Image (cartoon, coloured by chain):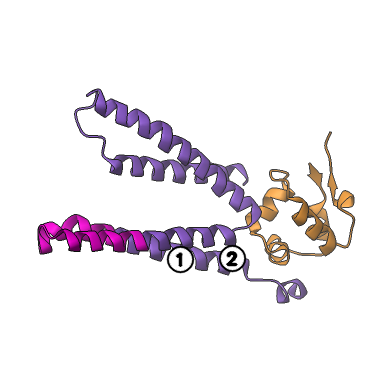
Amino acid sequence: MKNRLKVLRAERDWTQADLASALEVSRQTVNAIETGKYDPSLPLAFKIARLFEKQIEEIFKDEE
Amino acid sequence: MAKQKNDSIDWPGQTKESTIRLAKWTILWVLTVAIPVFGPALFWGENHLISFLAILLNVGVGIGVIMAMINHLKKQDEMMQKVQLEAMGISLGVAIVGGIAFSMLDKTNVIPFNAEISYLVMIIAFTYLVSVFINLRRYK
C-alpha cells in the first residue's frame, strides 16, 4: 500500500518523532509506514487521516 | 510541532518504564530460582516444607513476571506488538518441536546426557531474541 505520509509530514515541517508522538506510536512505526514496510491498522489509518484533516483514501492508496 | 506534543502521551517514556519494570521482575524471578536450587544444600537440608515455600515464592514472582510481560505488550504500539507476536509464535513452535525432539533424543539414548529443561529455556530465549531482532530489521 502506498501512502503520502512523508509528504504530508514534510509539508507541516514535522519530524518522525513529532508525528509518532501525535499518533501515540513509536518513531520506528512511523518510519515503517512511510517506507511502505508496514501497513497501519484501520484505527491508526483513521487517526492519521484525522490528524492531517484528510480522507483515508487521500493518504493511502492500494497498489493493485 | 509543539502543539502536537502537548496533548499526546510520552510514548517512548511509557515503553521504557514498562521495559524496566519487566526487567526488574525478571531479575527477581531469576533470584528466586536460586533459593530452592541452592537452599537445601547450603541452608535447610532435607526440609521439604521450606523447599515447598521457596518454590511457591518462585511461582508467585513468576506470576508477577507474566503480569509485567502482559503490561509491557499492552504498552507497545501495533507494529511492535506484531513483532513481539511473531517472535513469540516462532519461539512457541521451537519450544514444542525442539522440546519433543530433545526429549526423544534423551529417551533413545542418542545424546549422552539428560535432556534438562534448562537447555530448552536457553533455546527458547535465543530463538525469541533472534526473532525480535530479525523482525525489527524487516520493518527498518
In the rendered structure, the residue with mark 1 lies on which chain? B
- Magenta residues (range): B31-60
Q: Quarter of the image containing the N terminus of chain B?
A: bottom right
Q: Does the residue at mark 1 contact the one at mark 2 (Cβ under 8 Å)?
A: no
Q: Amino acid at mark 1?
A: Ile
Chain letter tied to orange = A
Give how far across and how far down residue B62 sits, in percent. Answer: 37, 59
Residue B37 in magenta stretch: yes
Q: Position of residue B51 (x, y in %)?
A: 20, 59
Q: Which secondary structure, mark 2?
A: helix
Within 10 Å of the Cα at label 2, are there few (<14), some (14-19), or many (20+) other Cα atoms? some
Q: Position of residue B136 (x, y in %)?
A: 57, 47
Say yes or no: labels 1 and 2 on the same chain.
yes
Residue type (three-letter) at the residue carrying disc 2: Pro
Q: Color used for chain B?
A: purple
The local secondary structure at tag 1 comes to helix
| Residue B44 counted in the magenta span | yes
Subunit that carries the residue with mark 2 = B
B106 versus A25 height, above or below: above
| Relative horizontal placement of residue B111, taking residue B67 as reference (left or right) | left
Label 1 to label 2, Cα distance in Å? 12 Å
Which of A27 and A57 lies nearest the eye of the viewer? Answer: A57
Q: Nearer the viewer, mark 1 or mark 2?
A: 1
Identify the residue at horizontal 57%, vertical 68% (top origin): B14
- The residue beneath circle 1 is B20
Q: Which residue is mark 2?
A: B12
Relative height, residue B116 to residue B105 (above, below): below
Residue A14 quadrant = bottom right
